[in-house]
Amino acid sequence: MGYWATRGLRGSVLEELINSTNESYLSNGLAVVHKIPTPITPVSLDKENRNINLAYFEQKSTVDYIGVAQGFPICFDAKETSLARLPVQNIHKHQIEFLQAFENQKGIAFLIVYFKRFKEFYFLPFGKLNEYWQNAQNGGRKSIPYSDFDKQYLIRCKSKYLVHYLEPLNTYLCNKL
């Protein structure tokens, strides 16, 4: 089982932005998307500050978010990196398997990737992610370079939608058809 200690809550700011966006989507009738909590068991607690110092994951998580956007079932994971690349090791085999199974059922699976260095968010379709992941498993490149992210899938902030991923999702669907 995985343990959560000093590296815990990585990506929590990204998730807060996505959660806010999802609340706005819901209130405006655009999508119903929810965060899937990862069950943890605390091992060490700081009772004075009411913080978890050490915990273990009870089971492997699938993805961060799942829902439906205007009739399309979607699931995605949120990843962030301070590098000019997304390390493929940040995506686990069980996540790839879940994303693939979701797509096999005619859902749309993707990542939302935040590049801290460039202050940019990207929509990364599962097909593209899977190409890199499979290549890495076969001894190829172990990361996805920033330069390989398609600018048409850049996620912009728009009014109350802080990470407005429905626009690049729409672009993806138009390109796919």
Image (spheres, helix red, strand yellow):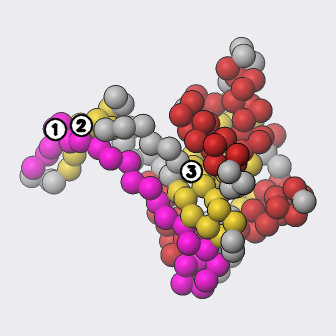
Q: Which residue is mark 2?
A: 54
Query: Element type at marker 1?
Result: strand
Q: Residue placed at 68% from the left, 36% from the top?
A: 85
- Residue range highlighted in magenta: 25-47
Query: Where's residue 95, x and y in %?
Result: 56, 38
**View extreme (bottom): residue:** 28
Amino acid type for the residue under numbered disc 2: Leu
How far separated are the C-alphas under marks 3 and 1? 27 Å
Q: Earlier in the sequence, mark 2 or mark 3?
A: 2
* Foreground residue among 167 and 38: 38
Q: Which residue is mark 1?
A: 44
Asked if residue 90 shows in the view, the reply is no
Q: Are marks 1 and 2 in contact (CB under 8 Å)?
A: yes
Among the 4 quarters of the image, the one containing residue 8: top left
Q: Does residue 29 show up magenta in the picture?
A: yes
Query: Element type at marker 3?
Result: strand
